[in-house]
Every structure is written in C-alpha cells, then in structure tokens.
Image (cartoon, rainbow, N blue to C red):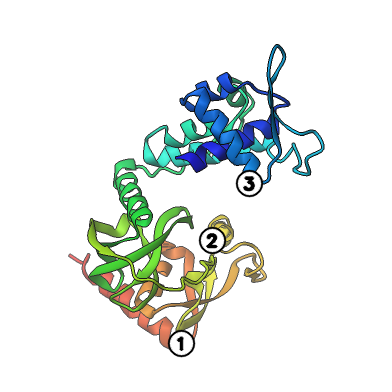
C-alpha cells in the first residue's frame, strides 16, 4: 500500500543523510518513477524532501527540518524488530520481519547481530492459536463479525463478536470486542475458542471505548476470603499478584485477601495449590471447601 511505502521512505530518510531513488525503488520493489511521485507526495504533506541530480546526488530531508533525525535510531529499530519478530513467532510467517526490513535502513544482518532480546509468544501448540489470530485479524480489517464456540467455567456458549483488539496479556492471547449476545464488551481467551468463523455480517457503527488492561481481573468479584499459603509458594504468588498484596505470618507463610468472581472458580484456584493453601475465613467458604475436598476424596476410596 502507498501509505506503508511513504512511512518506509520517511523512516529511511530520517536515518540516512542521503539515499538514491534507485536504492529506494529496489527496496520497495517499485519503479523509480513511483518513488519520485512518493517524494512529491511527502513534499505536498509538508515534509521538505529534496532531490539532487548528478554524481553524489540523492534524496534527503533538508538539514534544518524540525523532525528529529534520531526519531528512529538503530537501538529503536532493534527494539521494534524484536517486537515484530515476536509476532512472527505466533503467526509462523516472516510477514512482520519483511515489514521491518522495508522500514529499516540498516542491513538485516547487522540488526540481528546486535539483537540480544528474543521474545517468543507462541504457545506449545502454535497452530491452535496462529490460525485464530490470522482469521480475527482479517475480520478486524474487514470490520466483519465473528462467531465461535466458547468454553468457560460457567459452561459452553456460542458467541457473536465484533472484534476490535487482539491482546497478548496474562501470558495468553485474547480477543476483545462487543459481544452481541451479552450486549457488552467482553474478552475471550483464544485457546478456549473453537469453531471460529467470520459471519459475513458487518460490525455496527458504534463509539468503541478505549481498551484498558485490568491486571487484577481475577481478584475482583463477589467472593472475598482470607487465604494462607505455604511460604514455599511465594514465587508463584509474586508471579501472579506482585509483592504489594502479600502479607506474612510469623513463620513466613503468606496471607492474602482475595476476591473472586464466584465460589466454584475460587475453589478450583485454591485446589491448584494442593495442600499449600488453606482458606482461613469466612467460615462458610472454609466449610464449603472442606465438603468439596471430601467429595473428591470419596471418589478415590476403594
């Protein structure tokens, strides 16, 4: 697309003092005439790009132009490259790397040599998520609704969604959008989605609110209880809640006051700690959890 090429040309001109039209034509796989028309477009948009003919000539931005030429430094480009490569780790393609090569004035080999950051966002079963990401991305570009089967602690449902954001958060991929079945904005985890398809229906025109990250989404809700955790589990609790929420008993065990969406999902979370967690209060949740444990134990009695 022309806008992508214009951004790419501007990026290169901000990094290099001068570049020839032939070099730009080769990089963006278009004719020199197309590059010259792009330069005219940049000039018309208010960016003073000049073209000098003859030996030693080339295309450049005037030296006193107010745009900072360090806008995209080599360090910036390497950081951006790491991010784009992380998206390739999900999609299984080189699409974003190829985009970065077009935007970067540096040779790819030199960028890779200095890049010590590796971000791999892929799941163990890459195909389970990559195909969904690609379909949802296409749906968002076409402003098309999607439909899928969704599995949650509350059961299985079929949902129709106007997708607005693909989100990598809490170590997993999600799609965020307007759920027409709930008439509200919802977040869905991609690994719990099956039978994903585009419906062919256009998304409605609406004022979409800004997406905000709710870091402690699973610690807010109707259930509130005090839980004691064995000190050996501190690594996991810090990983999930940080350090500010943690309290301590005299022997080093950890005290947390947790709120949760509902009792069943709260009990399942506590069970994930084995014998390393104990509900302290209120007594009603403690007794109900004890009954759940007894029912589990009864299944293994011979």
Q: Secondary structure at mark 2?
A: helix
Check if mark 2's residue and mark 3's residue have beta carbons within 8 Å: no
Left or right of residue 107, residue 282 in this image: left
Looking at the picture, tell me which residue is in the foreground, 231 or 76.
76
Near mark 2 (Cα within 10 A), the count class, few <14, some 14-19 or many ≥20, is few
Residue 176 to residue 134: above or below: below
**Is residue 74 among what the camera can see?**
no
Left or right of residue 60, residue 112 in this image: left
**3D distance between C-alphas at marks 3 and 1:** 69 Å
**Is residue 222 among what the camera can see?**
yes
Looking at the picture, tell me which residue is in the foreground, 30 or 115.
30
Looking at the picture, tell me which residue is in the foreground, 116 or 262.
116
Which residue carries the number 2 mark?
240
For marks 3 and 1, the one nearer the N-term is 3
Residue at x-position 46% and y-position 70%: 208
Residue 265 to residue 234: above or below: below
Which residue carries the number 3 mark?
45
Which residue carries the number 1 mark?
283
Residue at x-position 37% and y-position 56%: 140
Q: Residue 76 appears at what percent x and percent y?
A: 66, 38
**Nearer mark to the viewer, of 2 and 3:** 3
């Amino acid at each position: 697309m022309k806008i992508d090429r214009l951004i790419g040309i501007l990026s290169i001109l901000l990094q290099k003092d001068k570049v020839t039209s032939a070099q730009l034509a080769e990089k963006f796989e278009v004719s020199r005439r197309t590059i010259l028309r792009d330069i005219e477009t940049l000039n018309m948009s208010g960016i003073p790009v000049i073209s000098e003919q003859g030996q030693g000539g080339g295309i450049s931005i005037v030296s006193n132009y107010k745009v900072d030429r360090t806008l995209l430094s080599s360090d910036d480009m390497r950081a951006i490259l790491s991010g784009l490569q992380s998206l390739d780790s999900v999609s299984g393609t080189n699409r974003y790397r190829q985009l970065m090569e077009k935007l970067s004035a540096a040779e790819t080999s030199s960028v890779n040599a200095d890049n010590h950051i590796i971000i791999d966002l892929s799941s163990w079963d890459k195909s389970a998520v990559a195909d969904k990401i690609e379909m949802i991305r296409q749906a968002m570009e076409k402003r098309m609704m999607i439909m899928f089967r969704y599995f949650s602690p509350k059961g299985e449902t079929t949902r129709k969604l106007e997708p607005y954001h693909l989100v990598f958060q809490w170590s997993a991929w999600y799609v965020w959008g307007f759920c027409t079945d709930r008439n509200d904005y919802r977040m869905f985890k991609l690994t719990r989605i099956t039978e994903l398809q585009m419906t062919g229906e256009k998304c409605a025109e609406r004022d979409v609110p800004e997406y905000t990250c709710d870091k402690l989404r699973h610690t807010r809700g109707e259930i509130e209880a005090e839980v004691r955790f064995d000190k050996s589990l501190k690594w996991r609790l810090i990983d999930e809640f940080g350090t500010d929420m943690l309290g301590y008993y005299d022997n080093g065990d950890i005290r947390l006051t947790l709120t949760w969406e509902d009792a069943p999902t709260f009990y399942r979370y506590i069970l994930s700690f084995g014998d390393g967690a104990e509900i302290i209060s209120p007594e009603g949740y403690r007794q109900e959890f004890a009954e759940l444990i007894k029912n589990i134990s009864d299944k293994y009695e011979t």
